[in-house]
Image (cartoon, rainbow, N blue to C red):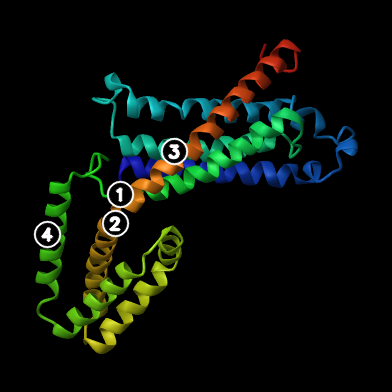
Amino acid sequence: MSYHKLSLFFLYTLTVLITLYLAGYGWEYYSLPMHERARHELHEEWKPTGFIGQGAGIIGSAFMVVLLLYSLRKRWRPMQQGWGDIRYWLNYHIWMGITGPVLVIFHTTFKFGGIVAVSFWSMVAVALSGVLGRYLYLQIPRSLSGEELSATELAELEERTRRHFSSEVSGNPKALQILERFIEENTAHSGGLMNWLTRDLTATLRYRALRRRLQHEAGLTSHDAKHLVDLAKRRALLDRRIAFLATARKLLHHWHVFHKPFAIIMLVIMVVHIAVAISLGYTWIF
């Protein structure tokens, strides 16, 4: 496992553990009606202005600000060279975009009202749309550095993939027939975003069924069937991405139009909220 994957595994594990701790330990407090919370033993520490409640808000808000560095890294020319792989930046951007809102939710103690509610629901919209944006980003073929492939590079990749696939399967006509049919079906039925999502969510089941079929009908061993299924998976995914490249680009453009306004609203209200909290002495930091 690479350092990058290991770090992401650690970070997401940390997010899950913190979430489970806050939800589990504070469940009795969070489940109380608002008028009864002041008498609970956790109130002083877990309320929005308490050490834990406000601490969660501060860290979560910091994440929501730091993740903006990804946009700077992507657009500001001095940061486009020598600042690391853009794909890694995106992965950490997504982690902060998930963990930040989770911590902010605990900061609110699940009470949403007034203008802060606008910021909160904007934050939820940003987080959920971020997951969709990541999915759309992956639908566009890219190089190892994360840059979108040119038409020439895409044609070369497609040719290499097809040639490698053909050389691996050519010795078994029955397996070739099964796999070609499978690839055709998986490309032809991908007519829109919902179909993409549905087929990707059920991909594991379909690939398992394909593997069993290769074993039973083409006489392949489990290992050989798995190898050919992996090749077919890569080719089918590439064929789909090429066939619907224009659609993916268009959807990603519309996603940016939706994503950015909510991010701006969230950040502006968050800054106002923090400024008011500091000015009124509601924070233990200042």
- Among numbered discs 1 and 2, the one appearing first in the sequence: 1
- Write the residue at 40% across / 68% down: 204
Name the residue type under label 2. Answer: Arg
Image position, residue 110 (x, y; %): 74, 40
Where residue 78 sits, quadrant-wise, is top left
User: Could you say which disc has been placed on residue 241 in the image?
Assistant: 2
- Among numbered discs 2 and 3, the one appearing first in the sequence: 2
- Of labels 1 and 3, the one closer to you: 3
Name the residue type under label 3. Answer: His
| Residue underneath mark 4 | 159
Helix, strand or loop at disc 2?
A: helix
- Among numbered discs 1 and 4, the one appearing first in the sequence: 1
Mark 1–mark 4 Cα distance, whole angstroms, equals 17 Å
Where residue 76 sits, quadrant-wise, is top left
- Write the residue at 41% across / 50% down: 135
User: Does residue 139 appear in the picture of this structure?
Assistant: no
Name the residue type under label 1. Answer: Ile
Helix, strand or loop at disc 1?
A: loop
Image position, residue 220 (x, y; %): 21, 82
Helix, strand or loop at disc 4?
A: helix
Q: Are marks 1 and 2 in contact (CB under 8 Å)?
A: yes
| Relative to 153, 251 lies left or right | right
Q: Are marks 1 and 3 in contact (CB under 8 Å)?
A: no
> Callout 4: 10 Å neighbours few (<14), some, many (20+)?
few
| Residue underneath mark 1 | 140
| Residue underneath mark 3 | 256
